[in-house]
Amino acid sequence: MTNRRKRIVLAYSGGLDTTVAVRWLKGRGYDVIAYLADVGQESDFTKIRQRAKKAGACEVIIDDLKRVFVDDFIFPALKAGAAYENKYLLATALSRPLIAMGLVNAAKKSGAQYVAHGCTGKGNDQVRFELSVKMLAPHLSVIAPVREWELVSRDQEIRYAKTHRLPIDVTKKSPYSLDKNLWGVSIEAGALEDPWHEVPRDAYQLTRDSHKAPSKAAVMEIYFKKGIPKRLNGNGLDGVKLIEKLNSVASKYGIGRADLVENRLVGIKSREIYEAPAATVLYSAHEALENLVLDRETFHFKNGIAAKYGELVYYGLWYTPLKKALDKFIDETQKRVTGYVKVKLERGALSVIGRRSDYSLYNKELATYGDDDIFDQSLAKGFIDLWGMPYTAIGKKGK
């Protein structure tokens, strides 16, 4: 009787951890399908495919998910105004539920019973991958080799790779751990682990130092329709091209850097450096348009929803009922978020310098202090008396 080998789909990046994981899993009786999601990381996919095959993968899948990433993950987060702890625009966190969905789909097509990832037990990504798989395909078992194997350090992984003649690049010794996609870059480790230490210039991957930015400012006009950017400087672009163009321009001006000591989901604090040029421009422009077209109560309430939405993304809860319900609320708020925003990019500085919309709630005749003023100032006293009535009563009772 033949022994039927187990099939497993591994989220494969081409780096040391996942290349070692291919051989490690194969040595434990698995037929390994290396799954690589293209979310705009600009990797050499031909080289990565060859590396996975040499490491022992029986099949390599390269899945172009850039358009899905933008339309179904990035733009919903943009409409929500979602950010984690007010700074992190969630580039890596947004990609994980999408990659998990790709893993699940690949497992279904190949008949695999298992999926795997290369995350450590210390990070957030293990949670994002595994919770997504649990919600999308609870019948699949998840294996995390880095949490299980006997290789306790990077040096031991390198020795394992050399012993098994795995095709890894160990000559480039960057001290940083990087994750890049179309929406931004996450950078950690090395000198960054000391929160008192200034970020070394070589840590940044996308953005130019501001003092090296062009001396002439760049002015860009962005058109939004129902909260989604559709045109840049009058040119209609799909989401991927629009983000690529904004990344190219904004990075030259040093736009989109963030230095954050954040609270990881697993309970530790971590110093993270983020670069998100296009995301920073679009978030600022989108918020400026909302300021113009949303009423005060909706705008203020939505700010709280944005913070919660950001937490859900960061915590790996993309496919939960609460996130789906919040999407319905956010879509309702975006029905009038249509119009134009003009931004200026200067050395390390981003400014919104104009906004207009057919749905604008701004009334110059009420706001002006000039001769066109129609605001009846005589109404103010009665408004203040009514607004302050409970506080007046408190005042009369004494402190």
Image (cartoon, rainbow, N blue to C red):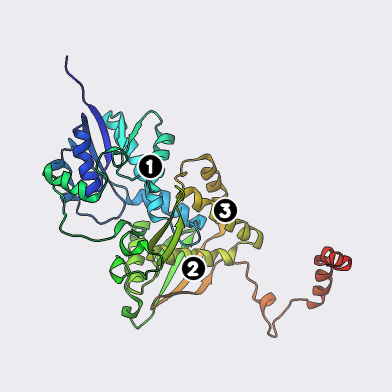
Q: Quadrant of residue 261?
A: bottom left
Which residue does the numbered mark 3 point to in the structure image?
Answer: 305
Residue, disc 2? 340
Mark 3 neighbour density, 10 Å: few (under 14) some (14–19) many (20 or more): some
Q: Residue furthest right?
A: 396
Label 2, secondary structure: give it. Answer: strand
Q: What's the amino acid at mark 3?
A: Ile
Secondary structure at badge 3 equals helix
Q: Is residue 332 left or right of residue 176?
A: right
Contact flag, marks 3 and 2 (Cβ < 8 Å):
no
Amino acid, disc 2? Tyr
Q: Nearer the viewer, mark 2 or mark 1?
A: 1
Residue 359 visible in the current orientation: no
Is residue 56 at least partly visible in the picture? yes
Q: Residues within 10 Å of mark 1 (few under 14, many from 20)?
A: many
Give the image location of residue 192, x and y in percent: 35, 63
Q: Please rate how many residues cluster around mark 2, counting C-alpha atoms within 10 Å: few if below 14, some from 14 to 19, many from 20.
A: many
Compared to residue 33, the image places residue 278 above or below, namely below
- Which residue is at 47% across, 57% downward? 78
Amino acid of disc 1? Phe
Task: Determine the CA span between mark 1 and mark 3.
Answer: 24 Å
First along the sequence among labels 2 and 1:
1
Distance, label 3 to label 2, CA atoms, is 24 Å
Secondary structure state at the residue bearing disc 1: helix
Q: Nearer the viewer, mark 3 or mark 2?
A: 3
Q: Quadrant of the C terminus?
A: bottom right
Residue 129: mark = 1
The location of residue 197, given as percent across then percent down, is 37, 69
Do the CB atoms of the residues marked 2 and 1 lie less than 8 Å apart? no
Q: Nearer the viewer, mark 1 or mark 3?
A: 1
Left/right placement of residue 310 relative to residue 375 reads: left
